[in-house]
Image (tube, helix red, strand yellow):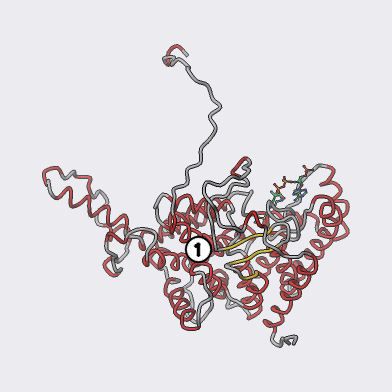
Amino acid sequence: MKKTFSSETEQISEVILKAKEKACSETSAEPEPDLTQKIEWPLTCTVGPGLEGAIACETEVGYVNGSKGWLIYRGYDIFDLCAYSTFEEVSYLLVNGKLPKEKQLAAFKKKLAENRHLNETQRLLMSFPVENMNPMAALRLGTNLMRQKQTFRDEEAAELKAEAIAADEDSIAMETKPHGDAHAIYEFKRSQVKRPRSSDITLLNAESLESCYCLISGVATIAAAIARLRNRKLPLEPLTELSHAANLLYMITGKIPTPVEERIMDICLILHADHGMNASTFASMVVASTLSDVYFSIGAGIAALNGPLHGGANEQVMRILREIGDPKEVPSWYAAQREAKQKISGFGHRVYKTYDPRARILAPLAKILVASHPEMKKLYKVATALEKEVVATLGKNKNIFPNVDYYSGFIYNSLSIPTDFFTPMFAVARVSGWTARVFEYLQNNRIFRPRAMYVGKFDRKYTPLTKR
Ligand code: ACO
């Protein structure tokens, strides 16, 4: 029997299920045998530059079927997760592999709520000129500062060193503690944090799982603090009664979002939480594989996401739509771009050769939000006109369709998130996928170590500097 939806937020679920119906009618979803089977090492695969086509590991976290437009987290279809689930539940699912039971979800939400308070890290962050920094650089810095409080590795190492020095007191150098006590530098009350046994200090233990949860929750707090500091406003305390999505918006804007705004933000977080072995996920896994720690791993993910080939196309989309300005201008603008052989931001994808399922979901949700923003409503009309042109030409000839970045900017701008803050929003969501994949990989860890083909010279004779 067809379910009927009543409230505004339930109508959003209906919109998503309609998008699912359309996706299913246009493509038949089937796993690709070459990408969905157990690996027998050594494996033979055809590899292109940049490791394209290389298989690095097995995973149960998520799967992208690019030819069918299928995105799966832990066996669940992205359309269903967006229609029925929440970011908290999806994060639990990604990291733990199963949907939580009621009590587990309540405990997980409580943990996220506790970890959302990062006053000491924020104070430390405020000692840097955040307002003048690239927001992703500030986010990476903030993640590193979270690490100071949460990891025990440095403390362990420092203690071992201190013990070694103490055994030979004559050799204590004056600069052993040049800046004074750790408390004085960082303001962190380390004695309150329960310290694990030293043999447990690896990435793969309960303390590390706690760190994953701390990052899933805390990176959002740090991002929000950065957004405010860039506007020369003080960071806001999270509100216990709000969800992760609502808190994120509240801590950025200072306004408690409406249920519709909260629901759409939540769906954006779910949609961006994981996406296969993309560059930032791989970067975080490479760092983890050295048995570094999860904070450094997530810092690497943030660094990789900062590049314009990865995050940030949605910023460009909003700029070009504003440049076009009116739906009437679309045909001439598009013809000029084609003539100049320019790629159109927000279209095409390395993996999807069909309509990106995330764009199918975001397009109707953006339409809901822009309805109450006249400027955005006009730009949305420009976007749909451009999509029509591109799909009729490049879609037909080259399988180029809108990607996740085409409509997400409408949502963020309508939620009062500035355009130069889109990539940090992406990072906030992706922390769930990064931590889930890092945690999974470490269960069968092997340090990443590809080789490069040496094509340089041999037998060159060293010439002294004065004779070159
Ligand atoms: N507009 C116009 N033509 C395009 C576009 C586009 N957006 N994307 C690809 N093409 C064309 C290329 O010109 C090329 O044509 P040719 O065969 O005649 O030379 C053909 O399609 C294949 O292009 P590639 O760049 O090889 O495709 P690839 O799969 O490597 O590229 C990429 C994917 C990088 C995303 C590309 O589509 C692009 O640059 N898009 C615009 C930027 C963008 O939206 N990025 C966000 C991606 S989503 C994300 O990262 C979260």
Note whether 173 is above or below 34 in the view shown.
Answer: above
The reply to whether the residue tagged 1 has its Cβ within 8 angstroms of ligand 1 is no
The image shows residue 175 at horizontal and vertical percentages of 23, 45
Query: In the figure, 252 relative to 110: above or below?
Result: above
- Pinpoint residue 112: horizontal percent, then vertical percent: 46, 73
Horizontal arrangement in the rendering, residue 108 relative to residue 45 (left or right): left
Residue 89 falls in image quadrant:
bottom right
Q: Residue at x 49, y 55 (%)?
A: 138
- Residue 187 appears at what percent x and percent y? 32, 63
Is 326 situated left or right of 412 in this image? Answer: right
Residue closest to the eye, 313 or 46: 46
Q: Please, which residue is most extreme toward the front here?
A: 40
Residue 409 in sight in this render: no
Q: In the image as oriented, which residue stretches furthest toward the top?
A: 467
Q: Residues within 10 Å of mark 1 (few under 14, many from 20)?
A: many
- Given residues 51 and 28, the one toward you in this image is 28
Query: Helix, strand, or loop for circle 1?
Result: helix
Amino acid identity at mark 1: Ala
Question: As rendered, which of 374 and 381 lies closer to the eye?
Answer: 381
* Residue 184 seen in the figure: yes
Quick one: quadrant of the N terminus? bottom right
Residue depicted at x 86% and y 56%: 392
Q: Which residue is mark 1?
A: 436
| Residue drawn 50% across the image and 20% down it | 458
Q: Position of residue 382 (x, y in %)?
A: 81, 61
- Mark count: 1
